[in-house]
Image (cartoon, helix red, strand yellow):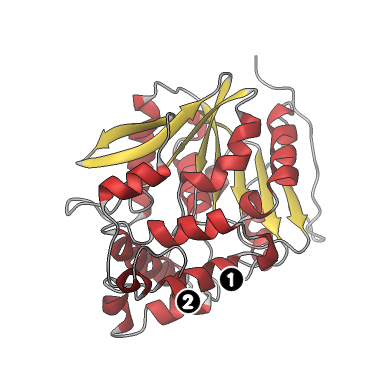
Amino acid sequence: MKASPSGIHAMGLATISQEDIEKAYTDEDSQWYAYKGLRVHYKDKGEGEPIILLHGIMSSLHTWDDWAKELEKNYRVIRMDLPGFGLTGPLNEDMEYDKDEFITFLNSFSHMLELDKFALAGNSLGGYMSAHYAATYPDRVSKLILLDPIAYPQDVPWVITMANLPGIWHLSKKVVPPLMVSMNVEEVYGDKKRIKPEHMKRYVQLSMRKGNRESYAEILKLIYEKSKPGKEAFPFNQITAPTLLMWGEADKWVPTSQIPNWERDIANTQTIVYPGVGHVPMEETPEQTVKDAIKFLKEENKETVKTATKEEAVEEVDVAPAA
């Protein structure tokens, strides 16, 4: 309610003008990339090996603020408001809400920045996109970090089920009360006491950006459909980049029971589970998670070879990195 400019905004019936929303959530580091008629908001700061950070659903590049402050000391850090979210806003009529569209976007974006190879980190839906990109273009991804990624079939959170009920889905494209947004934010944190007021305000106000409600509804529909068994073949065994799985133990959206799927399909993985943490570890516990991410990025590449036996044993073989 406090984040709403007026009573009608608090009811979820009004939007915030593009001028006002950009004034509130851009700074001197903000840049814009023209892509298929969209103005993609992004930041590119720091020097060193490049790393691209992809946020999750209903979020924006700002979810990485604390990580960026540390990473920018030694890396070139690139993050953007993905199409459909943040200041970038909804897809146009010629675009589709599916993984192929996002892979095409990320490939275009990385080529625009003249990146030949880069590390890639993604949370939630951003993790889904990152994993598919790394499987599609394995030679372009040096390291992969997946934070509570969504992909495999699972029971979806109540908000996704509710949003896809007949009638509700069409209504949610027009009306999203701040109360619903704040409830969702509390749901993705393991400890809601860790939610900073400025984070809650950002989530609420960016949901009022014109067109974002429609995007949220489309994305929730996509996730709902992809959560059903047998809907998609996962090419993640084609990922060659060393991969770090970072997971909140208290994640209600994508539970830790999903971890074995990723460890099975990606040959070279490490896994860290954070007790008491929810779906957005980089936002809820940024100090520890970015420390672990930097340690992983600095490691020499090792290949973990998984050999199936009757006991499903795992043999690890260190391989010197290619010259």
Q: Position of residue 31 (x, y in %)?
A: 36, 31
Q: Residue lying farthest top?
A: 323
Residue lying at 81% horizontally and 44% vertically, measured from the top left:
315
Where residue 98 is drawn, which disc sits there? none
Q: Residue lying farthest left?
A: 93
Residue 102 shown left or right of residue 73 in the figure: left
How packed mark 1 is, by other alpha carbons closer than 10 Å (few <14, some 14-19, many 20 or more), is some
Q: Quadrant of residue 142?
A: top right
Viewport quadrant of the N terminus: bottom left
Q: Earlier in the sequence, mark 2 or mark 1?
A: 2
Q: Amino acid at mark 1?
A: Glu
Q: Provide the residue designation for mark 2.
A: 159
Is there a contact, CB below 8 Å, between mark 2 and mark 1?
Answer: yes
Q: Provide the residue designation for mark 1.
A: 187
Q: Amino acid at mark 2?
A: Val
Residue 17, can we see it? yes
Residue lying at 75% horizontally and 51% vertically, measured from the top left:
272
Residue lying at 28% horizontally and 85% vertically, measured from the top left:
167
- Up-down: is 320 above or below 261? above
